[in-house]
Image (spheres, rainbow, N blue to C red):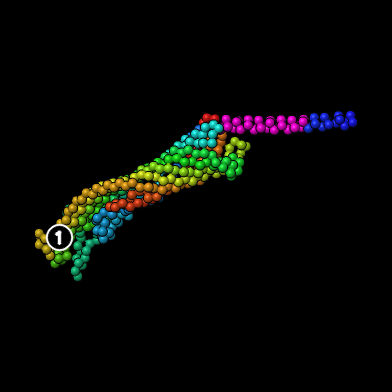
């Protein structure tokens, strides 16, 4: 009896000790986990500053400017100025952002800026030799001559300057969602905010054409004077075209990052991505100023009296100004690779943004054209605080 009575307290004591040991181990593990989490939280930067550059391919076009004398230019075998019309196709720019995530919070506050610009000049000089004219059975050579008795050629000079600029600004607030959804150390965030966009283009042209520069025809024999005409055509145009869009509206975006490789826990390579959408409420504007002059003279001194000739001179100035409120949908995306350190990051990738119906690209009447920017980028980020 006594042995049986003494055995029970011993077994209960052993059970109590095992329970206490397990509890202590669990408590120490929890304390260690909390300590590591706090240490990691303490080491995490609260502010990230990102700066970089980009090369954008610009999509979208505008209506081709066609001066009134284009038919005469083409008729005489010359290149029309409309063939030289161009909008900027590439631009260099800068990107930058500042993000802030308070300690112990899953909310992030971000301000982003994208800016791009480009400019260029196209010049074209064309000269077409006017061959001699052979008339009658005697094959008499008749050579076009100018007022100073020098040979004349059909000529044109086109000078076109074009410039483009665009800026996109975002103010957003985001929250971490789906942490670890694509594996350890991956992240995903949803953002909502306001997007501001501004685009502007300017095309300035100086166009001059002499498609018919004959002042007279030099002839050798009096018998062939009935083949002589005196005529002259010359044209000038100087259009200056401005187009612009300014808009602001709500935006949504979803960003994520998934690790690809990890080197000793210090440097990590990750795949980054982002998709975004916005609706911009704004105004598109177009201003066109054009000054056109022309001179057309024609006279046949043999078949018509001296006072019967065609001499048309005209000068016309055009001023067009349009402004219209529009709603512009916008979608975009980003894909890239980052090399991450505890307090720094280097990123490379490709981003795109498309704005539908943003530009009034018409000349005499309004015409809506899309505008898109897409191309490679590279950024460097530095983390502060922690």
Residue depicted at 36% across the width and 43% down the height: 246
Q: In this rendering, would 170 be left or right of 323?
A: right
Nearer to us in this view, 140 or 87: 87
Residue depicted at 39% across the width and 47% down the height: 328
Name which quarter of the figure residue 5 lies in. top right
**Quadrant, the N terminus:** top right
Query: Does the magenta-highlighted stretch encompass residue 370?
Result: no
Residue depicted at 33% across the width and 46% down the height: 325
Q: Residues within 10 Å of mark 1 (few under 14, many from 20)?
A: many
**x%, y% of residue 163?**
34, 45
**x%, y% of residue 174?**
50, 39
The reply to whether residue 381 is visible in this rendering is: no
Total marks in image: 1
Q: Which residue is mark 1?
A: 299
Name which quarter of the figure residue 183 lies in. top right
Residue depicted at 43% across the width and 40% down the height: 194
Task: Report the magenta residues as a range.
Answer: 16-45
Question: Vertically, is 205 above or below 50?
Answer: below
The reply to whether residue 30 is visible in this rendering is: yes
**x%, y% of residue 33?**
64, 33
Nearer to us in this view, 156 or 116: 116
**Quadrant, the C terminus:** top right
Nearer to us in this view, 292 or 131: 292
The secondary element bearing badge 1 is classed as: strand
């Amino acid at each position: 009896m006594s042995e049986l009575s003494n055995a029970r307290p011993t077994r209960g004591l052993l059970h109590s000790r095992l329970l206490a040991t397990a509890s202590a181990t669990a408590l120490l593990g929890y304390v260690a986990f909390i300590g590591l989490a706090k240490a990691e939280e303490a080491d995490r930067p609260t502010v990230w500053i990102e700066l970089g550059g980009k090369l954008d391919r610009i999509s979208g076009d505008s209506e081709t400017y066609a001066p009134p004398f284009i038919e005469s230019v083409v008729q005489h075998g010359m290149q029309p100025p409309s063939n030289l019309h161009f909008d900027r196709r590439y631009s260099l720019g800068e990107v930058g952002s500042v993000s802030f995530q308070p300690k112990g919070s899953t909310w992030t506050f971000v301000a982003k800026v994208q800016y791009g610009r480009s400019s260029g000049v196209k010049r074209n000089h064309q000269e077409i030799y006017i061959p001699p004219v052979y008339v009658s059975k005697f094959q008499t050579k008749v050579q076009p001559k100018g007022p100073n008795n020098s040979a004349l050629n059909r000529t044109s000079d086109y000078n076109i300057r074009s410039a483009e600029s665009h800026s996109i600004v975002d103010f957003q607030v985001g929250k971490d969602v789906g942490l670890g959804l694509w594996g350890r150390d991956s992240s995903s965030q949803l953002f909502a905010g306001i997007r501001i966009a501004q685009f502007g283009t300017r095309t300035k042209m100086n166009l001059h054409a002499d498609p018919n520069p004959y002042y007279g025809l030099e002839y050798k024999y009096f018998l062939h004077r009935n083949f002589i005409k005196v005529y002259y055509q010359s044209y000038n145009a100087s259009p200056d075209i401005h187009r612009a869009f300014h808009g602001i509206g709500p935006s949504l975006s979803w960003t994520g990052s998934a690790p690809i490789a990890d080197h000793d826990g210090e440097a990590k390579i990750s795949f980054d991505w982002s998709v975004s959408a916005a609706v911009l409420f704004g105004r598109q504007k177009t201003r066109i100023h054009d000054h056109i002059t022309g001179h057309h003279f024609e006279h046949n001194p043999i078949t018509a009296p001296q006072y019967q000739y065609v001499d048309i001179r005209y000068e016309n100035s055009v001023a067009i100004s349009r402004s219209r409120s529009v709603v512009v949908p916008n979608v975009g995306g980003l894909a890239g690779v980052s090399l991450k350190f505890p307090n720094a990051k280097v990123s490379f990738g490709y981003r795109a943004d498309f704005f539908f119906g943003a530009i009034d690209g018409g000349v005499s009447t309004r015409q809506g054209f899309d505008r898109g920017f897409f191309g490679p980028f590279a950024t460097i980020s530095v983390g502060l605080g922690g």
